[in-house]
Image (tube, rainbow, N blue to C red):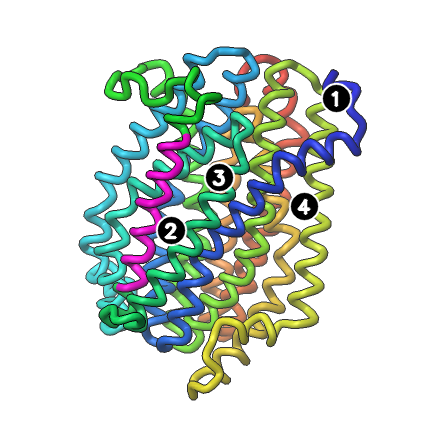
């Protein structure tokens, strides 16, 4: 029985479920890293535009992906209860809500240039970022549907296919980007537009692969995911929406911290913005490992919360946190001992601006080591809280930590106190520490009891 599992058994179960999810998260991150590396070789201004464009797309994707993330604990719970119809309905309504979001958000991409100009970005960088978003924005619905299918498959234990499809997507992204960014293999040289086309191609191809797998795999046919797809299921729609919108806003709260820092770094300078983007990419690679562990924790905690197994829930949470802590320690060691080597991977060292980018990026990467533990704590706590369907209070805690503490601290340290880009990153550290501490306290003090009482936490 689950309550008799040893900590070693919990670790094995978490890694069995989580390693493919970690691999998938890293592969997903590799898509963005590949674009950043290729654009870093292409030029500083295009790289700055890509940083703004991709971060703008991502922050809106995070908002919409709340519905996809809500599917994971809901489907895990329905599966544990043996309710095949509910497994299908929750995922289908997640797809519906994601599509609606994608349609409503595209005007933001269309009007991105005047928005970026109003936010203080240069005309050249804003125009290039607009070119990226006009194309990449068309992929919002495919990207969100991929996220829903990934959550659905992961909750059903089908994490391997998520990994392999994402790895294939990395190869496709590199191939299309290499051709269209630089004009290789007889293709036109499109710069940031080439990166956008590569991104869109990956999203459409990934959706096709996962959709066919979900529809045709014999083991998944009993769930009949796409059966009567046009039919609205009111209770399932409300359930996904109730759980999903706070998850999306929580992601916005965190993503907004980093997006605001990117915008403010643009006020500091183009070289600083390019270095900022590279350092964030490096930190995000490490973060993806914690995301994979967090997703595994969500699935396992949802099952234990549904069966009322308090001891197994606590043990599973403890083991997941220990694993995440080990990862954070390794990353800190790498960032502190080899910062120049990490930053140097992202730039063409023959270009005149590269030295300044590496120098500033090294300082930022050392600061990134400071928030590794806090960043790991906050994402793991969010995964654990989603497992007991507690999303509203975490949303408030994240908003306070990032918007009332982190962003103001970044601005004050960077500009009134004159610390520039270093001050911006110090504010990131402050905001993440506040979020990590408060969210972890929420889980251990309140959420497990509320979830095990048979009702979602409030």
For the residues bearing labels 1 and 4, Cβ distance under 8 angstroms: no
Q: What is the CA distance from the residue labelled 2 to the residue labelled 1?
A: 37 Å
Residue position marked by numbered label 1 in the rendering: 311
Circle nearer the N terminus (3, 1): 3
Residue position marked by numbered label 2 in the rendering: 58
Q: What is the CA distance from the residue labelled 4 to the residue labelled 2?
A: 24 Å
Circle nearer the N terminus (4, 2): 2
Q: In the rendered view, tell whether residue 30 sits above or below residue 73.
A: below
Circle nearer the N terminus (2, 1): 2
Residue range of the region highlighted in magenta in the rendering? 194-213
Q: 424 and 136: which one is in front?
A: 136
Residue shown at 72%/19% (left/top)?
Answer: 2
Residue position marked by numbered label 4 in the rendering: 324
Residue shown at 49%/83% (left/top)?
Answer: 349
Q: Main secondary structure of the magenta part?
A: helix
Q: 399 and 134: which one is in front?
A: 134
């Amino acid at each position: 029985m689950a309550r008799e599992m040893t900590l070693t058994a919990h670790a094995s179960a978490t890694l069995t479920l989580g390693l493919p999810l970690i691999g998938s998260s890293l592969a997903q991150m590799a898509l963005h890293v590949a674009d950043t590396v290729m654009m870093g070789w292409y030029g500083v201004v295009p790289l700055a535009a890509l940083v703004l464009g991709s971060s703008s797309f991502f922050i809106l994707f995070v908002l919409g992906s709340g519905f996809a993330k809500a599917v994971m604990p809901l489907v895990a719970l329905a599966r544990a209860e043996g309710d095949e119809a509910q497994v299908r309905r929750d995922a289908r309504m997640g797809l519906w809500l994601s599509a609606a979001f994608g349609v409503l958000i595209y005007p933001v991409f269309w009007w991105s240039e005047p928005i970026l100009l109003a936010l203080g970005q240069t005309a050249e960088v804003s125009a290039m970022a607009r070119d990226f978003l006009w194309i990449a924005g068309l992929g919002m619905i495919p990207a969100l549907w991929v996220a829903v299918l990934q959550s659905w498959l992961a909750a059903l234990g089908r994490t391997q296919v998520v990994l392999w499809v994402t790895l294939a997507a990395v190869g496709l992204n590199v191939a299309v980007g290499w051709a269209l960014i630089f004009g290789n293999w007889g293709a036109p040289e499109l710069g940031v537009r080439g990166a956008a086309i590569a991104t869109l191609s990956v999203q459409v191809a990934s959706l096709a692969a996962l959709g066919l797998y979900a529809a045709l795999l014999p083991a998944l046919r009993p769930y009949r995911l796409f059966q009567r797809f046009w039919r609205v299921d009111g209770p399932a729609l409300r359930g996904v929406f109730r759980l999903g919108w706070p998850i999306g806003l929580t992601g916005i709260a965190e993503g907004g911290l980093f997006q605001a820092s990117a915008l403010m770094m643009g006020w500091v300078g183009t070289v600083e913005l390019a270095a900022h983007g590279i350092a964030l990419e490096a930190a995000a690679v490490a973060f993806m490992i914690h995301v994979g562990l967090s997703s595994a924790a969500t699935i396992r905690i949802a099952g234990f919360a549904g069966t009322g197994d308090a001891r197994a829930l606590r043990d599973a949470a403890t083991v997941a946190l220990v694993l995440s802590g080990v990862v954070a320690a390794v990353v800190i060691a790498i960032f502190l001992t080899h910062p120049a080597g990490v930053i140097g991977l992202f730039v063409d060292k023959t270009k005149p601006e590269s030295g300044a980018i590496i120098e500033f990026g090294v300082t930022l990467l050392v600061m990134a080591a400071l928030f590794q533990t806090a960043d790991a704590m906050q994402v793991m706590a969010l995964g654990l809280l989603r497992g007991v369907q507690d999303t509203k209070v975490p949303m408030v805690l994240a908003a306070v930590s990032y918007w009332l503490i982190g962003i103001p601290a970044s601005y004050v340290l960077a500009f009134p106190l004159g610390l520039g880009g270093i001050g911006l990153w110090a504010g990131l550290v402050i905001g993440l520490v506040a979020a990590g501490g408060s969210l972890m306290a929420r889980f251990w003090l309140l959420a497990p009891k509320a979830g095990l009482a048979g009702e979602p936490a409030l």
